[in-house]
Image (tube, rainbow, N blue to C red):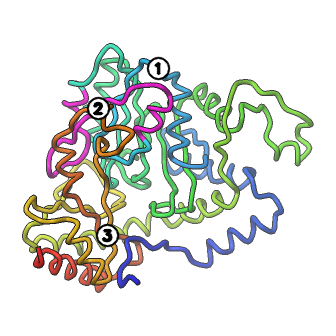
Amino acid sequence: MWRVQLYKNNYDERENQAVKEVLASGWLTMSQKTHDFETAFSAFLGHGSLCLAVSSCTAALHMTLLALGLKTGDEVITCALTFIADQNVVEICGAKNVLADITSMTDWSVDPADIEAKITEKTKAVMIVHYAGFACDMDRIAALCKKYNLFLIEDCAHTPGADYKGKPLGAFGDVSAFSFFANKNINTGEGGMVVTRNAELLEKLRLLRSHGMSALSFDRYKGRASSYDVESPGLNYRITEISSALGLVQLQKLTEANNKRRQITEQYYKRLDDIPYVKIPYRNFSRGESSYHIMPILLADSLDRAAIIESMKNNGVQTSIHYPAIKSFSAYKEKVSHSFKAEFVNAHELTLPLYPDMTEEDVSIVCDALVKGIAVN
């Protein structure tokens, strides 16, 4: 159906072999591959990072709020431009979402000044998102959290391999959450990682991950334990061995894959700079190296985005939107305030295909289809 689809994974025989090894082992749930993945990811992030592999980034965020003790009546400042998982986990914990707007039409990162303006005596945490793999202003945000004694949570769903002034994203927050969903820079189908540098907090997260149990099924299988205690209430947010095995391979390929993403993005820049009615966020970004997770553009207010999406579809190019406005969802329209800059982006953003194995010809096909879509408006 698609001449160029939104995303393709970069699997090869290495992923196939990793899965075969797990199947041959006869043990599919969390065990040695997961331990190896956590160890490798800790080494990858550095800075004393302690990592637990989990079933999704959403699970990591939910566990984080529970481990930090968020409760009814508390407020969490979240980003107005993000996937709904951030708001969902806050709502499920009984706390209140307070949306902070983006910085500008060219910098879609959350605005530190708006974060500070939204802080009240009920605020307990700030949950930021490094949109598209571009770092937020971590100096200012970390300083705010320290000043007001707030937890800092990094949603790093878009960021593996990205940094802020040379320091890896995910190494700033009290807790950070990564995604390994099917379209992410590290792709295991489903999966995530929760990261902290606090050993006491890590233990709370470990118990939350697997029913609060003191020993895992694999420990009993190996004869290291005959029973278990339940030390605190917990959930089942375990990752599978297959996902962890895939994650190990994908982590090894990450640097090369991100470099290819960067090269494709630079090819886009050359073409898009000459296309009228289109702006590119983060065009002259200087806070660090991006992971180039997605290729977002901003369409002029005069253009009909839905018509462009349909035209590009008819020309064989798949696109997406990152993201609809939080207040546009039935569950949130009466619960969140307006975020005017973010809502303009919500209404006019278009995501173009981006993946490591794209070619220069693919970029030309996409941009030609975009030009045709604009022309029929």
Label 1 with label 2: CB-CB less than 8 Å: no
Q: Is residue 96 magenta?
A: yes
Residue 22: x, y in percent?
75, 64
Give the residue pinned by disc 3.
Answer: 319
Q: Which residues are magenta?
A: 86-115
Q: Which residue is mark 1?
A: 72
In the picture shown, does residue 340 fall above or below 313?
A: above
The residue at the point 17 percent across, 49 percent down is 344
Q: Which residue is mark 2?
A: 141
Q: Quadrant of the N terminus?
A: bottom left
Quadrant where the C terminus sits is bottom left
Q: Residues within 10 Å of mark 1 (few under 14, many from 20)?
A: few
- Label 3 CA crowd tier, 10 Å (few <14, some 14–19, many 20+): many
Q: Secondary structure at mark 1?
A: loop
Mark 2–mark 3 Cα distance, whole angstroms, equals 32 Å
Real-space CA distance between mark 1 and mark 2, rounded to the nearest whole angstrom: 24 Å
In this rendering, is residue 367 above or below 88? below
Quarter assignment of residue 164: top left
Up/down of 75 relative to 112, above or below: above
Which dot marks residue 2?
none
Q: Amino acid at mark 1?
A: Thr
User: Residue drawn 55% across and 74% down?
Assistant: 11
* Residue 236: % across, % down: 68, 41
Residue at 36% x, 60% y: name it: 293
Q: Nearer the viewer, mark 1 or mark 2?
A: 1
First reached walking from the N terminus: tag 1 or tag 2: 1
Q: Position of residue 12 (x, y in %)?
A: 57, 77
Q: Amino acid at mark 2?
A: Ile
Residue contact at pointers 1 and 3, CB within 8 angstroms: no
Counting residues from the start of the chain, the first of labels 2 and 3 encountered is 2
Quote the CA–CA distance across marks 1 and 3.
38 Å
